[in-house]
Image (cartoon, coloured by chain):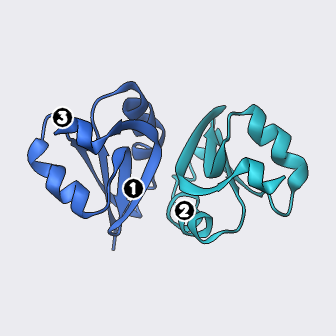
Chain colours: A blue, B cyan
Amino acid sequence: MSTKATFYHAGCGVCVDAEQQFAASLDPSKFDIEIVHLGEAPSRLAEAEAAGVKSVPAFVIDGQPYHINFGASVDDLK
Amino acid sequence: MSTKATFYHAGCGVCVDAEQQFAASLDPSKFDIEIVHLGEAPSRLAEAEAAGVKSVPAFVIDGQPYHINFGASVDDLK
């Protein structure tokens, strides 16, 4: 079964770069990848925060948050 | 051609977790992955720093550093 991996981003340069390098590169046989643009889908902010996302870009894999570099604080997206 | 991806870590809990979730999960048809334990191979520190690695765990993909969460500062490994 594929592991659920959600990539949260906000369209910034750091995010787009991370998306191209990581989100597009995880083994598709292992992951069910969803990409969420928090700027366009602010209704998903609460879910991202509940998973522990503090900044974007970030992955939540199997419920665990992984922040990549530092693009933008989640607080700045509210 | 595969892209060169180097995963630098120091054996800490954050690193091992990131290794299992990311390094083991990148699409092997797209990446040529090397895993470097900086605690065991301190001679590779200079190379990691030259690539922009500030903390581990981190990936360097195509020469670009991506820090994942924050395990340990590279300065603490010297």
State the image quarter where residue A39 is shown. Answer: top left
Classed neighbour count for the residue bearing mark 3: other residues with Cα under 10 Å, few (<14), some (14–19), many (≥20): some
Nearer the viewer's eye, disc 3 or disc 1? 3
- For label 2, the crowd category at 10 Å Cα-Cα, with few meaning under 14, some 14 to 19 and many 20 or more, is many
The kind of residue tagged 1 is Pro
Secondary structure of the residue carrying numbered label 3: loop
The residue where tag 1 is placed is: A28
Q: Distance from label 3 to label 1 (Cα)? A: 26 Å
Foreground disc of the pair 2, 1: 2
Chain letter for mark 1, please.
A
Q: Residue at x 73, y 49 (%)?
A: B74
**For the residue labelled by badge 2, is the local secondary structure a helix, a strand or a loop?**
helix
Q: CA distance from mark 2 to mark 1?
A: 18 Å
Query: Mark 3 — on which chain does it sit?
Result: A
- Please give the chain letter of the residue carrying mark 2: B
Tag on residue A39? 3
Image location of residue A18, percent across then percent down: 44, 37
Answer whether labels 2 and 1 touch (C-beta < 8 Å). no
N-terminal-most mark, 3 or 1: 1
Residue type at tag 2: Ala
Residue at (22, 63) in percent of width and height: A50
Is there a contact, CB below 8 Å, between mark 2 and mark 3? no
Q: Nearer the viewer, residue B34 or B71?
A: B71
Q: Amino acid at mark 3?
A: Gly
Q: Residue at x 85, y 63 (%)?
A: B40
Q: Position of residue B3 (x, y in %)?
A: 62, 38
The residue sitting at 61% across, 69% down in the picture is B16
Q: Say which residue label 2 marks.
A: B18
- Residue A9 spot, x, y in % from top left: 30, 40
